[in-house]
Amino acid sequence: MSSETEQTVFLSDYSPSPYAIEKVELEVEIAPEVARVHAWLTISPREGTAPGTPLVLDGDELMLDSIALDGAPLVLSAYASTPRALTLIEPPARRFVLETSVKLAPEKNLRLMGLYRSNGTWCTQCEPEGFRRITYFLDRPDNLAVYRVKMIADAALAPVLLANGNLVEQGDAGNGRHFAVWDDPFPKPSYLFAMVAGDLGSIHDEFTTMNGRKVALGIYCAHGKEDQCLYAMDSLKRAMAWDERRFGREYDLDVFNIVAVSDFNFGAMENKGLNIFNDKLVFAKPETATDADYANIERVIAHEYFHNWTGDRITCRDWFQLCLKEGLTVFRDQEFSSDERSRPVKRIEDVRVLRAAQFPEDAGPLAHPPRPDHYKEINNFYTTTVYEKGAEVVRMLATLLGEAGFRKGMDLYFERHDGEATTIEAFIKCFEDANGRDLRQFQQWYLQAGTPRLAVTENYDAGTKRYTLDFTQTNPPTPGQPEKQPMVIPVKFGLVGPNGAPATWTGVSGGNVADDLIVLDGASARITFEGVANRPVPSLLRGFSAPINLETNLSEADQLFLARHDSDPFNRWQALQEIATALLTRAARGMNWTGESVAALAAALAETVAAPGLDDAFKANVLGLPTEANIARVLASDVDPDAIHRVRVQLIEEIARQIAGALQAAYAAGSVDGAYSPDAAQAGKRALRQAALAFLVRGGVGGAAEIAARQYQAATNMSDRFGALAAIAANWTADAPALLADFRTRYGEDPLVFDKWLALSASPADDGALERVRAILAAPDFPRNNPNRLRALVGSFASGNPVQFARADGAGFRFVADFVADVDKRNPQVASRVLTAFRTFRTYEPVRRAAAEAALKNLADAGGLSRNVADILERTLSG
Ligand SMILES: [Zn+2]
């Protein structure tokens, strides 16, 4: 890879391929060490293609065994083949069938792209460019073809043979082998191709669609894990029903299969009719999975299923449009979880993720628009900007158009573009046409990178009873985009009167205000409310109605008022976060907080936790003070992770001392009677209990560590046990190592629990963390090629342990850079993902900044890097 010329791909260079592959027939013979792929591709020149135009098919590490055209072998001068391309010099100017065969070595495929073997099971991953590692092809999303796949394998080694579509034939293939033929009638791009062969267990169920069609559902997994797939199956059926109810989308094939594999670069993959999942997003039982694991499984099972319409039936024209399917489908899975669980809690959790992961990306050297216009390595654009910010953009569209208007646009999108590979522009056009709206300026959200800042000053004139809000929008520069247009920002709002009830007004002017929505579309605006009896407190950006940084001139007293009285739960949570963030950022800069401020925050927390009528999961979120990473993000420069860690612990200690009684009461009230269930109400109870315990332990309240240790020992489910252990590990108290060791042995060889142990070993801020991680990684039996294990250990250290990753002596940086160089040789995708932990290195204080830069330059100097890592490294260093 290193000798390859670094080629940048530009959106503006897009043009359709001169030829189209319309039909694909594959015969795949699978045996240990080798797989033979025979392909018959029905190809036509597109209209306007000049006769004699060469046909160039993509390949990646392929070796051509044979080639024929319409059944006749081709002479050597008629084609050229390399591992990366197959060129027909002068193809016929009519429809023809190209026949090729190649041999693959799945066992040697450690990149986990194309066909590979995971724990004995043969499986595929083709998004974005893996199909070219299976056969020579027009491996681009705008080539839609129908597929028919015959798989042949040893009946004992691989009794299960699965591919996309419907099973149409199966039987004996001689010599102890058998075959299966799968036919997918829906034209699809090659990245949605999938195939699985192996000796797998399975569970089966059935779903009847809204029009009465029966769909056979199957989940395949390693033998003995079948009982751990039941929640995934339940989630799938709920997701299928929800998509019918909410979006009118019905499933289209006779079968829907899911396969859980243990070596997987991503979370899961939406291949048509055959989703392939990282097993951690399928397997769950109360003894080994936490409530968060269950919620994640539900979410991702739904996400991949929803892709059947937003991704598979309507796909992307090119990879620049990735957020067309991802942003939209994340929005859909967020809505599903909101409907199945608590909407405000889901919103808070999503915004936490957005601020922790996407905002730093948007503020640093890796910033890019949700719809980028150039890339060197598309694998590096599976980012939180494309996924989570992409979902925020769709959410704003829904806010601006209202639920009915949004649904009209979606209906038109499904009707107009079914069976197509399309673009963001075409998507937006559906909402314009369905609603008679001009959304050209709104489209900037897809084109401009960076998080907009919205400053608001409020003013009340008691004499005229006039209340004004002055908004100023700024869009900070990002790489390649020094200047920006103002964005369309939907600000959901309310004015809260002195008694906590909504304030009223007799007139409003100066901007686009309707009901509870202000729509800003210029650099600044002054909104004036007439006839406001008393000074209200504004509750702005309710439900986080836009992915922006809001800066207000509200006082601490105003925030406390909102925390108590706002009818919008998100803003109640946000108000307390604002107060804590202000205290922590000032303290991290060496300015002391006042006792009154801390006491007021502590009292508000205690009051919220005790308040009747609020969701337990909501209260748990209220107790989650801003993370160290979040404080670093707000500080934005001269960041000293030690100082942040220190003041955050101090604040927790002070608050815990003051409201220990309230926290202990919340802990006691949160105990669950009866059998474990992962439902939202029970999970919420456990979450609140857990948040209270973590607060008490972290705050050093007498006896809290002992309570945690007892809970650890007595727990009957993983949520309670893991929660207690996490509270102890975070503090790295004297008994932490012994309890972690107990946890390691208690669950034997369960790999998913092992990942939890790895993460808990890597995240504590104690000075021994780096040595601990180093020793675990160096153990001879550590599974060095499994992405889950590597991410759990080194990913947790690099992205979840800001103090030790950013040690002032640079040892943490050097360790992670060395790890990236090593893993890059086998799995560039995992390596480049871990490397992104350096994306905010320029915000550190000078000593750490220099140490991080030295580690990165050292990595660059070593050379021999994959395109994935080289691209991230170059952008990180130049930003
Ligand atoms: Zn997706």
Image (spheres, helix red, strand yellow):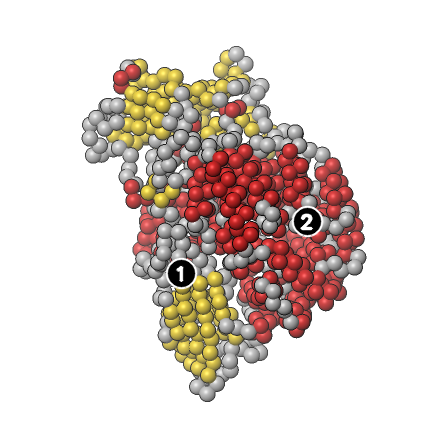
Q: Which quadrant of the structure image shows residue 512?
A: bottom left
Which amino acid does the dot numbered 1 rest on? Asn
Residue 233 spot, x, y in % from top left: 57, 40
Residue 690 located left or right of residue 240: right
Q: Is residue 675 left or right of residue 102?
A: right
At horizontal 60% and vertical 50% (from top left) the residue drawn is: 808
Q: Quadrant of residue 760?
A: top right
Which residue occupies the foreground of this view, 828 or 573? Answer: 828
How many C-alpha atoms fall within 10 Å of the one at disc 2: few (<14), some, or many (≥20)? some
Mark 1 and mark 2: span between their CA atoms?
39 Å
Q: Which residue is mark 1?
A: 475
Residue visible at 67% across and 37% down in the picture: 775
Give the vertical position of 717 relative to 699 (above or below): above
From the viewer's perspective, is residue 385 above or below residue 858? below
Where residue 165 appears, as percent x and y from the top left, is 44, 32
* Disc 1 secondary structure class: loop
Spot the residue most to the top: 175
For the residue marked with disc 2, what is the amino acid? Asp
Pointer 2 residue Cβ closer than 8 Å to ligand 1: no
Q: Give the numbered dot on residue 766.
A: 2
Residue drawn at the location 72% of the way across and 67% of the way down = 658
Query: Residue placed at 62% from the left, 60% from the top?
Result: 625
Residue 776 in view of the camera: yes
For the residue carrying disc 1, how many other residues have a C-alpha within 10 Å: few (<14), some (14-19), or many (20+)?
Answer: many
